[in-house]
Image: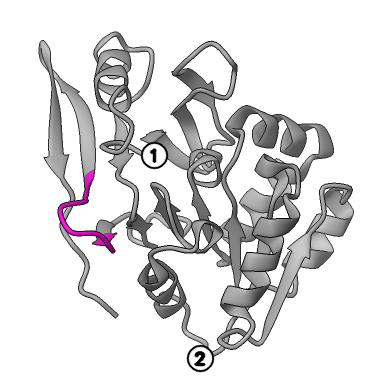
């Protein structure tokens, strides 16, 4: 049987925006421990101190430990940090900056190794994009465009799908032109679970929000809503 790394990708919102608290409840419910050890990566926002403070405030009472990986960490330090974790949460910001930093430091391979040995990975916006082969991102400064991730998860990702009006037509057009692989589109307030069997489920914190499998089919692009997970 094939083994898939476990990932929860958030389209937007969550604790860094002081919203959608049940998204993190859903995240914690996917870990077998009652009080897991969680770590935060703030590289995409240049270690924004406000986001780091919100991370500690959100998880202090519900996790056995809550630690932050500083941007100055190298691959060896990241490896040692990951050894003490059950769960990693990557914050939002600039996708290209995040991917390039991880590659320069060798952290991309360290993160993939940790995921393949069972650490649950999660992230919002840029922190969701980073795990995929490709993503739709405006981090290059020239509007929305295909951007490479680290390739832990096959296919492409588009966060903020229904919140930002240009996202949906841009994602569909890029897939139609083969500029992006088939992928997943995620609204703000929504989490998508990729489990050890490769199953994808959407969990929505907001009414009317969802996530979608977007794929080429002959001469068109088909968007199919993902099945909804039960509230924890």
Neighbor class of circle 2 (other Cα within 10 Å; few <14, some 14-19, many 20+) is few
Residue toward you, 115 or 78: 78
Q: What segment carries the magenta color? A: 203-211
Q: Position of residue 195 (x, y in %)?
A: 37, 62
Q: Residue 159 carries which label?
A: 1
- Quarter location, residue 3: bottom left
The 10 Å Cα crowd at callout 1, few under 14, some 14 to 19, many 20 or more, is: many
Characterize the magenta stretch by its predominant secondary structure.
loop
Task: State yes or no: residue 177 in magenta.
Answer: no
Residue at (48%, 15%) from the top-left corner? 143
- Viewer-nearest residue: 182 or 232: 232
Q: Which residue is drawn at 63% across and 66% down?
A: 54
Please tell me in which quadrant of the rendered image residue 29 appears: bottom left
Question: Relative to 209, does residue 46 appear above or below in the rendering?
Answer: above
Left or right: 96, with 178 as reference point: right
At a point 59% along the width and 33% down the height, the residue shown is 95
What residue does disc 2 label? 34
């Amino acid at each position: 049987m094939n083994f898939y790394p476990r990932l929860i990708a958030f389209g937007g919102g969550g604790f860094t925006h002081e919203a959608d608290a049940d998204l993190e409840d859903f995240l914690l419910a996917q870990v077998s421990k009652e009080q897991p050890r969680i770590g935060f990566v703030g590289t995409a926002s240049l270690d924004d101190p406000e986001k780091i403070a919100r991370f500690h405030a959100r998880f202090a009472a519900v996790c056995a430990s809550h630690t932050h990986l500083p941007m100055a960490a190298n691959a060896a330090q990241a490896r040692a940090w990951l050894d003490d974790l059950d769960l990693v949460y990557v914050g939002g910001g600039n996708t290209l900056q995040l991917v390039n930093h991880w590659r320069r430091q060798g952290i991309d391979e360290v993160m993939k190794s940790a995921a393949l040995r069972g650490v649950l990975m999660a992230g919002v916006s840029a922190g969701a994009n980073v795990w995929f082969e490709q993503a739709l991102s405006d981090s290059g400064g020239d509007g929305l465009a295909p951007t490479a991730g680290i390739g832990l998860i096959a296919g492409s990702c588009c966060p903020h799908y229904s919140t930002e009006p240009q996202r949906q037509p841009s994602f569909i057009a890029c897939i139609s032109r083969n500029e992006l692989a088939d992928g997943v589109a995620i609204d703000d307030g929504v989490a998508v679970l990729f489990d050890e069997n490769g199953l994808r489920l959407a969990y929505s914190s907001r009414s009317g929000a969802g996530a979608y499998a977007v794929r080429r089919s002959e001469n068109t692009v088909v968007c199919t809503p993902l099945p909804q997970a039960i509230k924890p």
